Amino acid sequence: MRVRSKQLFCQHLLQVVSLVSICLVANGDDDDEDKVILVKDSKEFGIHGNILSVGSIGKLPEWDSYGYIMYCPCMGRFGNQAEQFLGSLAFAKLLNRTLVVPPWRQYRNVPYSDFFKLEELEKYHKVILMEDFIQYLAPKHWSPGKRHGYCQVLNDQGCQMKENNAGRRFWDGFDVDFDDDDVVYHLNTNVDILNKRYKDVIKEWHTLFPASNHPVLTFKGAPASFPVQQGNRQLHQYIKWSDNIMQEAHLHMNKLFHGEKYVGIHLRNGIDWEKGCVWGEGRANFMASSQCLSKGQLLTSVMCYPSTQTILETTKMVVMVIDAKHVYIATDHDPLKEDLENYLQPIGVNVHYLNPILPQIDLAILGQSDYFIGNCASSFSSFVKRERDTSGENKPTTYWGFELESMYYR
Ligand SMILES: *[C@@H]1O[C@H](CO)[C@@H](O)[C@H](O)[C@H]1NC(C)=O
């Protein structure tokens, strides 16, 4: 059902607004994004350590006879991949299989541990970096001949694990090809750890796919939904930035803010988004909107694509509420820097637009802000929101288009 609704969604977008990039995101292929990042990343940048986790675990990985969950994060950009990662982590935990932690799929496969601490995940569940799985366990336990793809819908050609660009480049990055005999399942994978009803689904997985016969469940896409299930949001507490990322973020923060209060804002305003919002307006569910819409509430155009005036007024209001001295802008397109400066400099507020090579630096800095204003439908914003909610520091967040009186400083 999930698959079908995504395809429909894609077609609608194509018909109504001929929106290619969101269609591709929803459909699991995003060539566009990769090209953009490739260009942005061509400058030297010193944080891709690419250190395997043997160092962080301190020992060679042992085979887990309870089995593994592996998948390609084949859908969407970083924000979408992160939401599906949380659901996949929940699923692996419920099945008591080790999660093979995939790299982030950008212009190349970026190991999870380049951005985040693997050892924090281990506090929740057994995990292994995919790079380690391939290097240390695959030669013996998952060699060619044992590499079955698992998918829900089988067409004449089988699962076609590498049929789209995303899948091909992901698996090619590990020199993995699949055997011809794919495995089809009709069970649900999209669990919510707070929903007790999934106990039965888990039982069925164990019955139909015992680890003895199916040691490595290798899913074509994430065994989890986008957006993330409500109950799995809390798992974000185990996603902690690596020291490299935090050091880089703090360097910028010290230089820009000198320890003074700042409001972080996320402006999602590229042309793809503007068109997408025309389609999303009036819907109960559009992209990551479940992060902020309550039951029965519909997405409005001001939430999805706020006017410059709304952005100026909301930012100023928040700045005044917390008496901030700085505003930090992150955006995929237009930072509106001049507009914000003209509006905020008279009240003594500095406006910063860093535009770092790695969007993860933006995320980390937004995560630390004294107040965050995000876009309700954006998974980039939802990453920041979840990080703040699970940080234990009670960091306030609001969204464009939300009633001003609902904003208060805690
Ligand atoms: C889960 O798997 C571990 C091995 O990875 C095992 O020691 C443990 O007993 C399993 N738990 C259950 C409930 O089966």
Image (tube, rainbow, N blue to C red):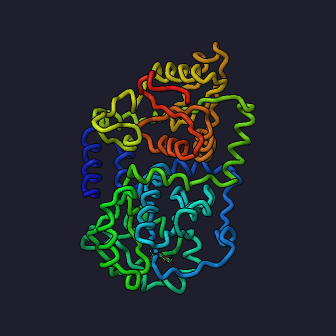
From this view, report whether residue 187 is shown above or below residue 43.
Answer: below
Residue 128 location, quadrant = bottom right
On the rendered structure, is 192 left or right of 4? right
282 relative to 214 in the view: left or right: left
For residue 99, above or below residue 116: below
Front residue of 337/32: it is 337
Q: Nearer the viewer, residue 332 or 343?
A: 343
Q: Residue farthest to the top?
A: 346
Within the image, what quadrant is residue 409 found in?
A: top right
Q: Residue at x 40, y 74 (%)?
A: 217
Query: Viewer-proximal residue, 206 or 215?
Result: 206
The C terminus lies in which quarter of the figure?
A: top right
Instruction: Note whether residue 240 is visible.
Output: yes
Q: From the viewer's perspective, is residue 4 above or below residue 40?
A: below
Q: Give the x, y percent position of residue 119.
A: 62, 63
Residue placed most toward the observer, 192 or 221: 192
- Residue 28 in sight from this viewpoint: no
Position of residue 209 measured from the top left corner of the image (x, y, whole percent): 34, 78
The percent coordinates of residue 333 (x first, y second) are 51, 35
Which residue is pictured at 28% across the width and 44% down the height? 14
Q: Which quadrant, please, contains the N terminus?
A: bottom left
In the displayed structure, does residue 297 sit left or right of residue 169?
Answer: left
Task: Tell me what residue is drawn at x 41 percent, y 71 percent.
Answer: 95
